[in-house]
Image (spheres, rainbow, N blue to C red):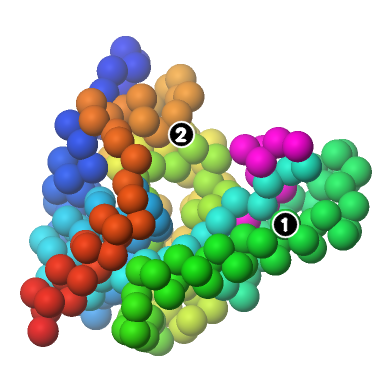
Amino acid sequence: MFSLGGGPMFRDREDAGEQLARLLSDLQGENVVVLGIPRGGVEVAAVVAQRLGTPLDVVIPRKVGAPGNPELGLGAVAEDVEVLDERLIRVLAVNEKYLRGEIAAQQEEIARRSSAYRGEQPPVPLQGKVVVVVDDGVATGGTAVAALRWARARGAAKVILAVPVAPADAVRRLEEEADEVRVLAMPEPFYAVGQWYDSFPQVSDDRVVELLAAWRGASE
């Protein structure tokens, strides 16, 4: 699916999840775990997991923000994973003290979210599984790289990135990290993930907790 007009392709994240589940339907019956990237990606992932009949969990990557410009990513981290843009760090002359402090702050936020989202539940085991990492879209792909490496480090036999929408250059980069990248649309020009949705509200921590709890309850 391609769009040249720049108009929305998805009503909301649930609609995107339904379409993505159809793209992944060949995985039904396989030894699959679906991981959503919080927060918005979990709404998409919950639909995919429901349709495929798989366990649902989260993977929590975080952007490492540049000094004075937190939206500019120096890379991304996940638990025990660092993916840094060494060239950008050199160009901006980012000192090691700032970098280590920012990484530590993001790792603290990852730990907070992991505890908030899962409560007393342990992470779903990934060893030997086909792991499908799901987000509501990709812009640059930095946090997705960290998520994919986290899943692989935990013993996934195969790692698939599945997103509704992403720019072609990000997909090419991510194809070097994942065993497969499945994407519904690669529109150009691409400015932001939200431009491809009719409804793209912020998703709260409470909503992520609700989705995970509901899926655990349904699968017990």
Picture quadrant where residue 212 is located: bottom left
- Give the Cα distance between marks 1 and 2: 28 Å
Examine the rendering and report whether any part of residue 107 can be seen. Answer: yes
What residue did someone put label 2 on?
Answer: 167
Vertical comparison of 136 with 33: above or below: above
Examine the rendering and report whether any part of residue 161 can be seen. Answer: no
Q: Secondary structure at mark 2?
A: loop
Pinpoint residue 169: horizontal percent, then vertical percent.
53, 36
Q: Amino acid at mark 2?
A: Pro
Q: Residue at x 56, y 56 (%)?
A: 62
How dense is the environment of label 2, judged by Cα within 10 Å: few (below 14), some, or many (20 and up)?
Answer: many
- Examine the residues drawn in magenta and state their main secondary structure: strand
Q: Residue at x 23, y 26 (%)?
A: 198
Pinpoint residue 118: horizontal percent, then vertical percent.
34, 75
Pinpoint residue 128: horizontal percent, then vertical percent.
37, 86
Q: Amino acid at mark 1?
A: Glu
What residue did someone put label 1 on?
Answer: 102
Q: Residue at x 10, y 84 (%)?
A: 220
